[in-house]
Amino acid sequence: IYAITFRGMTDVERGFEEYFASRKIPVQITYRDLNRDATRMPAFIEEIRATRPDIIYTWGTSVTLGVLGPYDAVDPAKHITDIPVVFTLVASPTLAKIVPEAGGTRKGVTGVIHVAPVAAQIQAMAAYRPFQKLGVLYTPSEKNSVVVLDEIRKIGRERNYDTITRTFRLDAQRKVTAEGAGDLVRELKEAGAQWLYLPPDSFLGTLAQDVIIPAAMEVGLPTFASTEQLMQAGALSGLVSRYHSVGQFTAHKVEQILLGKVAAETVPIETLKRFSYQIRISVAEKLKLPPPLPMFNYAEIL
């Protein structure tokens, strides 16, 4: 298995490895890390072509698109077309053009979606605290975030809430920078945001614990997490998949292809069957925003 990560090892990879170990399936995993730098991808593609792994594991939308290309713009010189790919931690493979829309398949491709349906996340937020204005801070170069934001806006038109956005700034080399990130949170609050939605955004994830969430707490803006990593960073609440379980589910799909000898495109692209609605009670107390009583019946209180 040739595995490409985006920001180093996570609980997804730990769950992935543990699945094979628990089932005594001998696998050799070669890890390569993009480290958020797309210029590393051509060397990985070259190595894949030279070593011919049985299967490729891709972490996140950017890595997956780097390996496969969009389904309608594949360049055989730059992309892999003849080795099965199993992706993990992709928010919306159809909106990102990894696979065609309407449940379409793509030869040699399957994977696991880690984000709960956006409509369910919006519903969970509104159940905790109804809102008319939703703030979103995101990285414009991260496809995961952009596709989720498109969905948030679409649902907003149906449910009559406004989406207020800010993007991280770019430096002189047009690379995303943390400069002024706290100010962007304050701007969203001043613009009337009643929640700060934290999308499945890797760059935001690096700043969430030390910059984004503290800035939101300072101005009394509750935060809602789309991923387990963002909940661990200190968000008030979130509807999330456990990364470890995502890794195990991804390994299960790899097993079907390698041992079951089935074509990757016949293995369904799915989310986990269950999500965890988590609430960090210390944050709720600081914000003076206790969860509605019925939530204690089903939420996981941290």
Image (cartoon, grey):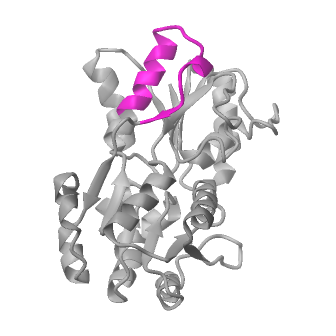
Residue ID at (38%, 47%): 10
* Residue 76 drawn above or below residue 244: above
* Residue 296 drawn above or below residue 116: below
| Percent of width and height locating residue 248 | 35, 31
* Residue 168 drawn above or below residue 35: below
Viewer-closest of 190 and 262:
190
Residue ID at (44%, 75%): 131
Tell me: 26 left or right of 95. left
| Percent of width and height locating residue 134 | 50, 74
| Percent of width and height locating residue 25 | 35, 15
Q: Quadrant of residue 229?
A: bottom left
Tell me: 277 left or right of 211. left
Q: Quadrant of the C terminus?
A: bottom left
Viewer-closest of 234 and 81:
234
| Percent of width and height locating residue 170 | 65, 76
Residue ID at (54%, 46%): 60
Residue 119 visible in image: yes
Q: Quadrant of residue 174?
A: bottom right
Q: Is residue 207 magenta?
A: no
Residue at the bottom extreme? 190
Residue 86 visible in image: no
Residue ID at (59%, 46%): 61
* Residue 281 drawn above or below residue 7: below
Tell me: 73 left or right of 249. right
Q: Is residue 264 magenta?
A: yes
Say how many tags the image has. Answer: 0
Q: Which residues, given as a range, are shown in magenta? A: 248-271
